[in-house]
Amino acid sequence: MPEMHYLIFTIIALALLFDFINGFHDTANAIATSVSTRAIHPSHAIIMAACLNFLGAIYSTGVAKTIGADIVKDASFVDERILIAALAGAVIWNLVTWWFAVPSSSSHALIGGVIGSMLVSVGSAGLDFYGIGKIVVSLIASPVIAIVSGCIVMLLLFRIFGRFSPSAINSKFKKMQILTAAMMAFSHGSNDAQKSMGIITLALLSGGFIFEVPTFVKLLAATAMACGTALGGWRIIKTVGGKIFKLEPISGFAADLNSSTVIFTATLLHLPVSTTHVVSGSIMGVGTAKRVNAVHWGVAQQMVLAWVMTIPCTAIIGAIIYKLICLIFA
């Protein structure tokens, strides 16, 4: 029993580390557009994002329950080593992609880590492929929806405000960007922080505890993400905010409004989505509405490659770490 408690505490610590890294890795999702258009000072944007990430993270637990229940068939298949390996693989991937300034999905990383460690521990019989399929569909569909809806939102704004001068419009929308950046930060916390909540809850369930996300888990996950956000993720902010499409206040407003709507809708449906994918997709859609060749598709292609590679790579990393843990603690 003491050893089990020790391993569960290790899982909780790793999950909070994952949340912390997720915070500074994905800070760009909430503030990149408003920072790149100079709508808000970077330090003010980070403080705002940290506070609203925290509030969003304690909003609900629906996504946490999806992550905790829909990847494996039964909690009895899961042991602490599996979750430690999964979290370690996700943390390593996030740090590598952050170092190279490549926006990648923390959601994909975590799910890939769980799949890889489960496959080498109990085999495919322990995986809930229907649940995994539902999660993967939401992860794939969300950026596509974001591209299409982002384009539509931008076209509507062009139609409504097209007769006004660009300088007058951008001046107004620069102020409105602060509101949409706040919406984006809240929606990011409402979806992303719940992924580590789900893993912690799965660990508590596998250890014999009742399946419910405890209040202390919500507060710990929210605090870890807020602290990570406060550090900022300047490498990825530069990629998301400026290298996909040259944003103006009106296009930044459109991208954030669209992203926050897509992400928060997913939260209400208890579906985990990649905030990185959604924000990047929104920016691509907004850029396409202006002019197709205004989007830097070479950068977009590199990002898509990273997205495709995330689940297989983290699955491999998770599997290797699980094997190493078994060798060390055999």
Image (spheres, helix red, strand yellow):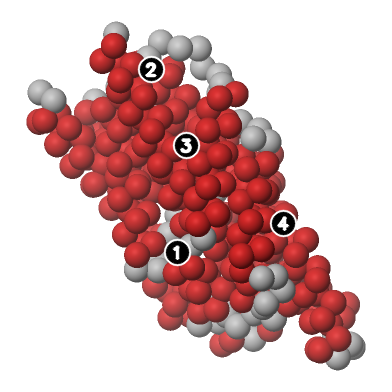
Q: CA distance from mark 4 to mark 2?
A: 37 Å
Q: Which residue is mark 4?
A: 182
The percent position of residue 72, horizontal first and vertical second, equals 39, 27
Q: Which residue is mark 1?
A: 103
Q: CA distance from mark 1 to mark 3?
A: 19 Å
Q: Does dot 4 land on a helix, a strand or a loop? A: helix
The label shown at residue 245 is none
Please report whichever mark, 1 or 3, sits nearer to the chain's N-terminal start: 1
Kind of residue sitting beneath label 3: Ser
Q: CA distance from mark 1 to mark 4?
A: 20 Å
Q: CA distance from mark 1 to mark 2?
A: 32 Å
Tell me the residue at 20%/40% (across/down). Answer: 321
Question: In the picture shown, does residue 224 fall above or below 23?
Answer: above
Please report whichever mark, 1 or 4, sits nearer to the chain's N-terminal start: 1
Q: Circles 1 and 4: CB distance less than 8 Å?
A: no
Q: Of circles 4 and 3, which is in front?
A: 4
Q: Which residue is mark 2?
A: 206
The percent position of residue 242, horizontal first and vertical second, equals 55, 78
Tell me the residue at 29%/45% (across/down). Answer: 89
Kind of residue sitting beneath label 4: Ala
Q: Of circles 4 and 2, which is in front?
A: 4
Tell me the residue at 48%/62% (across/down). Answer: 233
Q: Which residue is mark 3?
A: 196
